Image: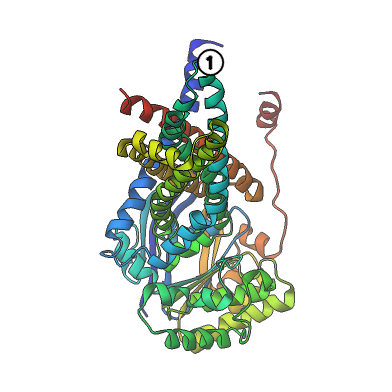
Amino acid sequence: MDNIIQITGLNAHYGDVQVLEDINLHIKRGEIMVIMGGSGSGKSTLLRHMLGLNHPSSGQIKILGEDISTISAMQLNKLRQKMGVAFQGGALFGSMTVEENIAFPLRELTRLDNETVKIMTRMKLEIVNLAGFGELMPSQLSGGMLKRAAVARAIIMDPQVLFFDEPSAGLDPVVSAELDDLIISLKKALNITIVVVTHELESAFKIADRITVLDHGEILISGSVDEVRQSDNERIQELLNRTPREQLINAEEYLHRLTR
Amino acid sequence: MNIKSIAEYVGKKTVPSIIEAGYVFLLFFESVYWIFSGKLKQQPVHARLFFSEAVTVGIRAIPIVSILCFSVGVMLAIQGIETLKIFGAESKVIFGISFSMTREFSPLIIGILIAGRSGSAITAKIGTMMETQEIDALRVIGINPVRYLVSPVLLAMFIMLPSLTLLGDIMGIAGGGLYSTITLDMSIENYITRTLEVLTLNDISQGLIKSMIFAILITIISASNGFQVKGGAEGVGVSTTRSVVYSISSIIMADMIFTYFINR
């Protein structure tokens, strides 16, 4: 099975702070890879690097065989047409209706006629169960509907790989479970590779083929759901059992912080 | 405070300003680049977006521009006649009105008005889009945000600001004419003929060139402030205020420099 995404030796910094350290990761065609980790683990930064929104300090990110930090802007744009992204808050354009939002990539990047664009848009609305809501403005949608509309926009160009940023964030458990089902059915129906970044354990175990656990910018484990569950790594077990991290206090450093 | 810490303080304050100035220049060149070579790169600047911006920036500002410039014209006439009375040369007010309106007041008043009206809107729009990840969404769809959001506004401003300035010239001279003809007991025909005698193409083009410079300053300063928004709704508010203050300050300073060089 070939790799859709291949990351080797990726290091990333925000200013002087290292947020990702020597990340090596591959994502296979047709699988759902969940990247999991707590707040500040670097999972969102990793996603931004995979999307080409941030530049790595060193290392290589290959998507569909192309190194996204060395290809030209034009090639990157071409590559991006094969990628779909559903952002955390939806990131729908507030000045357009839902239907205009979904049709936007088609109108900007293709020369399809109006009728075809309309039909394709409505087909995607049907897939995400939003038929009939196309005329509404994004501000009129609920949280769950916003995310589904964002999915419709992400799949309008029939991408080969689909990224989700925190799909369950801010949703109630029922809506969140519905979105998980949508993710699974998208994989089956469209046969695409899906990368999900989340901190929700339940959702991760439900949808994942493989899970990568990030902590403090490093990969703790990357393996199947069972491998992650059975891992004897202390930090992974802490994450799975929701145990609070033990804060070891260094007396000298503590005093220094108070008196500097 | 010792010398080292003063140097450190100055450095810390200076470096970000230099970085920002560099960013503003790059943003300007990138916007212009997309206007000219967007088609080649399969990222054209859409006529549809240009027209919609031109309507927002220009056409919708016509009423307020007309009223403001008309008022400034009346004001110039009142002050001019009062001052010239000292020398008994009230009729020379025509020089004052037509020169100051075309060379200075029309472009400046309109520049300040548009900085407040459209500059703030550009910053708030781009800033909000940054916060809601809409800019990221544009980028991952494969659309350059500068090409999509800044280039059409730059083009619209560059064309609409001189057009508004021309309208402002006419309205200002009309306002001045209304007051002068009544006060000085002059016929309207006489006022118009003498104004046309006095005015040269150079006076009008000076104002128009200024307004083009203002258009670039307002657009690029407002857009760069929008792209640098951080910190949620409050951040958008701070950047919007900053963008209006910077735009107006830069307009006035650019005006001074331009006026100095052109009248040497």
The amino acid at mark 1 is Ile
| Label 1 CA crowd tier, 10 Å (few <14, some 14–19, many 20+) | few
Q: Position of residue B94 (x, y in %)?
A: 45, 31
Q: Position of residue A260 (x, y in %)?
A: 66, 23
Q: Is residue A60 left or right of residue B112?
A: left
Q: Which residue is mark 1?
A: B86
Task: Please tell me whether residue B26 is drawn above or below residue B88 in the rendered image.
Answer: below
Q: Is residue B147 left or right of residue B73?
A: left
- Report whether residue A42 is seen: no
Chain under label 1? Answer: B
- Residue at left offset 59%, top offset 61%: A37
Q: Position of residue B133 (x, y in %)?
A: 54, 60
Task: Please tell me whether residue B229 is drawn above or below residue A212 in the rendered image.
Answer: above
- Residue at left offset 39%, top offset 48%: A57
**Outermost residue, left direction?**
B40
- Report whether residue B149 is seen: yes
